[in-house]
């Protein structure tokens, strides 16, 4: 299995880059005993970027080990006299130490966010260069953000195999000595403008100019040049407002019409020389909350989400290739959903690129730590800030979720410090990005949120519909009804009219293996699953109190057999029927199952499993 060499950072693209995915020398270090590369006994080969726990890596070791090592050589690219060579890592779980040609060049902590280092000064001669990575990841450390990674030897309940070391693309990038470092895009529909924040790396002078060209639907929207002041550019780019709504709508981004604005950014020097050039994209779209409704581009949008954990059978958290990421987006849309709740994972930017391009809404959720300590607060907060910085440009992202089901904050009702933590991250997130709603604690025990997100695995469609039927039941919902046995809001933090969403429900299992798999309920065959899903969705769609829903889940994930798709993404029943049940109306087009996909299997017996 090889990883497609798609550009790993889709919103800031340059021509000169090299993927370092592929075979690396490898060694497990179970006790984290080796501290320097010269001590390592290289005894295996791993395929990067797949983690050593996965079959795709060629290692497939799911045991306990505190560290592992990587080494590979690369040919020195032809650098211009003033060019720099940057080494990028998409994600390394959990603590990474990097050497280039036997020199320590950087350290990084955080398993879900990228980092980079300028290695120009550490290159030697003209021959092969060597990079070594030490990844330290204590498998039983519960005070770090780890998402669904199990701390027990074998996966249990709702937790899955661990992900250690490199699990996203490693790549080299050639950049000028003065270059475009970061871009931040925003949009404002009321003023019909695009906001741009650009930061210049290197030693910028006051004579630099930044040229910005924006195009959409074959039309030139802007062609402007701005002076760079103190290495920065802050501009609001006014677009020509077409005035007529129908024409205006052609430029708005939505799931049904994902119009992207393509951007070309050039950095010019004081003597008229082109120093740097990158390509990017943005979109005209606006997210908001009005009363009890979620709003997209000023209009109510009912959210039809599916919970997606982003695992693959052979490659774990890493997609087999870029096409697999695109196919997941296409499948979610073909199933009738207009969005996904990415659960306990900061997804690969390439997935977000396809969601931007094809039109799929995304809730981004921080992987949880499972202890409340000063260390866990520090680690999670820093990594959450880095995730928001990485992903805030993506138009597909419509909500931020720092906590899920009180994980890592298990005593919210009793301990004020834990409530302050949720409130602090809610407000920090709003400070970093004021354009999107924030769900402080998805599921229950809310103390700060823009959307009241409820997890409720009631299996009776009529009871589920009645529970969320109308405003008349709100009083009972927050005082007597306790889905999962938990308070929905804590004392002193009542529901203040925010939209109410059912963000986990369903979880109907269907598989041949009824002994080692589970779901919240179980169907006996594909036809029964289709009927059960249709009935449940009819009940939820009829609940007038709900601004949207999120079904559990997209695909089977290890021992959880409650996906609408098998783990290999084969639909368990007809996609057209699935889409009709999800949407409440027939799908617009027939979505065929890919050649080679098996028919839905018939289990031999029924077993009803429920999560304890």
Image: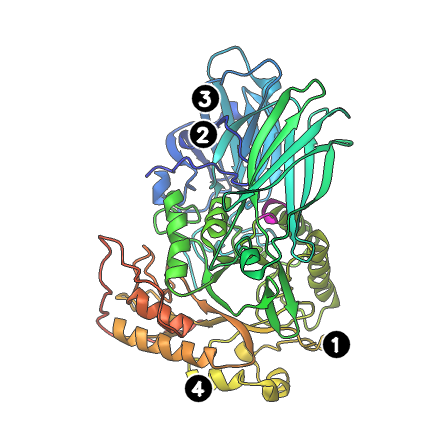
Name the residue located 46 percent from the left edge and 78 percent from the top edge.
540
Which dot marks residue 20?
Answer: 2
The local secondary structure at tag 3 comes to strand
Estimate the spatial distance between the alpha carbons at disc 3 and disc 1, rounded to whole Å: 59 Å
The local secondary structure at tag 2 comes to loop
Residue on which disc 1 sits = 492
Residue on which disc 3 sits = 74
Name the residue located 47 percent from the left edge and 52 percent from the top edge.
355
Name the residue located 53 percent from the left edge and 85 percent from the top edge.
469
Estimate the spatial distance between the alpha carbons at disc 1 and disc 2, rounded to whole Å: 53 Å
Mark 3 or mark 2, which has the lower sequence index?
2
Which dot marks residue 408?
Answer: none
Type of secondary structure dominating the magenta stretch = helix
Mark 4 or mark 2, which has the lower sequence index?
2
Tags 3 and 2 in contact by the CB under 8 Å rule? yes
Picture quadrant where residue 552 is located: bottom left
Query: Is residue 384 positioned above or below 484 on the image?
Result: above
Q: Residues within 10 Å of mark 1 (few under 14, many from 20)?
A: few
Mark 3 or mark 1, which has the lower sequence index?
3
Residue on which disc 4 sits = 462
Tags 1 and 2 in contact by the CB under 8 Å rule? no
Estimate the spatial distance between the alpha carbons at disc 4 and disc 2, rounded to whole Å: 54 Å
- Colouring chosen for the image of the structure: rainbow
- Left of 74 or right of it: where is 229? right
Estimate the spatial distance between the alpha carbons at disc 3 and disc 2, rounded to whole Å: 8 Å
Please report the bounds of the magenta region as a residue range.
389-393
Q: Position of residue 14 (x, y in %)?
A: 53, 30
Mark 4 or mark 3, which has the lower sequence index?
3
Question: 77 or 584: which is nearer to us?
Answer: 584
């Amino acid at each position: 299995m090889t990883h497609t060499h798609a550009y790993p950072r889709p919103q800031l693209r340059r021509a000169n880059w090299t993927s370092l995915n592929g075979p690396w020398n490898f060694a497990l270090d179970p006790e984290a005993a080796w501290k320097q590369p010269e001590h390592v006994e290289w005894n295996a080969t791993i395929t990067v970027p797949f983690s050593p726990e996965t079959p795709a890596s060629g290692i497939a070791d799911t045991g306990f080990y505190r560290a592992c090592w990587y080494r590979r050589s690369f040919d020195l690219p032809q650098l211009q006299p003033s060019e720099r060579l940057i080494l990028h890592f998409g994600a390394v779980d959990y603590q990474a130490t990097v050497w280039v040609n036997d020199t320590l060049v950087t350290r990084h902590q955080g398993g879900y966010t990228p980092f980079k280092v300028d290695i120009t000064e550490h290159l030697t001669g003209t021959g092969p260069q060597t990079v070594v990575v030490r990844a330290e990841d204590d498998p039983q450390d519960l005070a770090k953000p780890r998402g669904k990674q199990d701390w027990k030897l074998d996966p249990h309940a709702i937790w899955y195999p661990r992900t250690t070391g490199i699990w996203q693309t490693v790549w080299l990038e050639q950049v000028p000595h003065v270059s475009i470092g970061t871009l931040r895009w925003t949009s404002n529909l009321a003023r019909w403008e695009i906001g741009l924040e650009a930061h210049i790396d290197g030693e910028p002078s006051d004579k630099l100019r930044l040229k910005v060209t924006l195009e959409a639907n074959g039309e030139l929207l802007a062609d402007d040049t701005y002076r760079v002041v103190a290495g920065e550019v802050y501009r609001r780019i006014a677009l020509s407002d077409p005035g007529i709504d129908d024409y205006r709508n052609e430029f708005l981004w939505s799931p049904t019409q994902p119009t992207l604005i393509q951007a070309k950014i050039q950095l010019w020097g004081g003597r008229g020389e082109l120093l740097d050039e990158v390509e990017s994209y943005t979109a005209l779209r606006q997210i908001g909350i009005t009363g009890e409704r979620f709003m997209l581009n000023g209009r109510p949008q009912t959210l039809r989400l599916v919970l997606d954990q982003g695992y693959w059978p052979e490659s774990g958290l890493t997609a087999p290739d870029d096409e697999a990421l695109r196919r997941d987006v296409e499948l979610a849309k073909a199933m009738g959903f207009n969005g996904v709740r990415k659960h306990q994972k900061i997804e690969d930017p390439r997935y977000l690129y396809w969601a931007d391009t094809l039109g799929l809404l995304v809730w981004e959720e921080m992987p949880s730590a499972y202890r409340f300590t000063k260390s866990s607060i520090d680690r999670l907060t820093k990594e959450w800030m880095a995730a928001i910085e990485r992903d805030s440009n993506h138009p597909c992202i419509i909500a931020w979720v720092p906590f899920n089901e009180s994980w890592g904050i298990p005593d919210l009702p009793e301990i004020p410090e834990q409530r302050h933590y949720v409130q602090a991250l809610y407000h920090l997130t709003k400070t970093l990005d004021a354009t999107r709603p924030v769900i402080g604690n998805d599921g229950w025990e809310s103390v700060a949120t823009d959307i009241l997100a409820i997890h409720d695995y009631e299996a009776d469609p009529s009871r589920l519909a009645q529970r969320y039927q109308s405003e008349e039941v709100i009083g009972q919902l927050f005082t007597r009804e306790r889905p999962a046995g938990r308070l929905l809001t804590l004392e002193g933090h009542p529901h203040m009219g925010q939209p109410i969403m059912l963000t986990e429900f369903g979880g109907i299992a269907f598989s041949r293996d009824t002994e080692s798999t589970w779901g919240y309920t179980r169907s006996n065959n594909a036809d029964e699953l289709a009927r059960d899903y249709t009935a449940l969705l009819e009940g939820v769609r009829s609940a007038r109190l709900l601004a949207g829903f999120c079904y559990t889940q997209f695909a089977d994930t290890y021992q959880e057999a409650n996906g609408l798709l098998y783990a290999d993404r084969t639909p368990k029943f007809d996609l057209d029927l699935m889409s009709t049940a999800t949407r409440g109306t027939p799908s617009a087009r027939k979505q065929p199952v890919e050649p080679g996909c098996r028919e839905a299997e018939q289990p031999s017996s029924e077993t009803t499993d429920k999560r304890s």
